[in-house]
Image (cartoon, grey):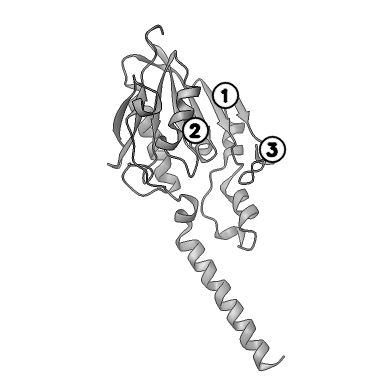
Amino acid sequence: MSAHLLRALALVLLLYGLILVLAWRYQDRLAFPAPRTRLPAPAAAGLPDGRRVAVTTADGVTLRGWYLPPGRGAPRPAAALLWFCGNMETVAGMGPLAADWRPAEAALLFLDYRGYGESDGTPTEAALYRDADAAWAWLAAQPEGDSGRVAVYGRSLGGAVALYLAARHPVRAVVLDSPFSSARALARLHYWFLPSGLVHLSMDTVARARALAVPLFVAHGTADRIAPIGMG
C-alpha cells in the first residue's frame, strides 16, 4: 500500500473517530434540539379561557405552558388530558392544533419541555421524564380536575414521554401520534454509520407499550420520514 493511500486512510479514520467523539459528547443536543420560541397567551390561539402557567420540577426547573380548564358544562371534577409535544415542537407552534383537538369536557395541560419554548433548563432523556412527573403532579392538584381520570397524549418524541408517565402514574388511557419504537432504532435508521453501542439514549416505547394495562390508541402516517409507519 502506498504512502499516499496510507495517509488518506489515516485521515479518514481520524475524521471518523472525531465524528464518534462528537456524536457521544453532543448526543443530547442532536436528540433534543430545543427550539426557543415566545409563549403567547392562549387567547392568541383562539383559546380565551386558557391561561399561561409555570410548573416547577423536582430538580427546580421552571416549565412554562398553557392550562385550559374544562368547559363550563363539563361535570366537576372533570376528566383531564396531558399533552406532550414532538421533538421540534413547542406550545406556541402547536397552539392552533390544540384549539382544534381540545376536548371541551376535559382540563388540558400543555407544557414545553425544559429548554423548549420559554421553559428553563437543558433537556436530556432523564430530565424530560422529570418534566412529565411535574406535569402530572400539577394537573392532579387542580381542584376542577379528577386525578383518577387523566389521559395522556404524546406526539412523536412525546410518545416516549407519555408512555414513561403511564408506567409510573395511574393514567386512564394513552394516545400516541407518530411514535417511534426506540431511540436506538431511530439512530440505526438515520445514523447507520455510527456503532449502535454509541447511543446512550433508550426511550424504548415498544417495551413500555407492551407493559400497559390501560387502553392504547396509536395513529401514524405513511408519509412520515422521521419515524416510519413501521415504528408505529
Residue 60, image x, y percentages: 27, 41
Tell me the crowding category of disc 3: few under 14, some 14 to 19, or many 20 or more residues within 10 angstroms, Cα based: few
What is the C-alpha distance between the residues marked 3 and 1? 28 Å
* Residue where numbered disc 3 is placed: 222
Which amino acid type is shown beneath numbered disc 2?
Ala
Q: Is residue 1 above or below residue 41?
A: below
Q: What residue is shown at x 65% (from left), y 88% (from top)?
A: 6
Tell me the crowding category of disc 1: few under 14, some 14 to 19, or many 20 or more residues within 10 angstroms, Cα based: few
Which amino acid type is shown beneath numbered disc 3?
Thr
* Residue where numbered disc 1 is placed: 213
Q: Is residue 90 above or below residue 109?
A: below
Residue 170 appears in view: no
Q: What residue is shown at x 45% (from left), y 54% (from top)?
A: 28
Q: What residue is shown at x 62% (from left), y 49% (from top)?
A: 185
Disc 2, SS? helix
* Residue where numbered disc 2 is placed: 162
What is the C-alpha distance between the residues marked 2 and 3? 22 Å
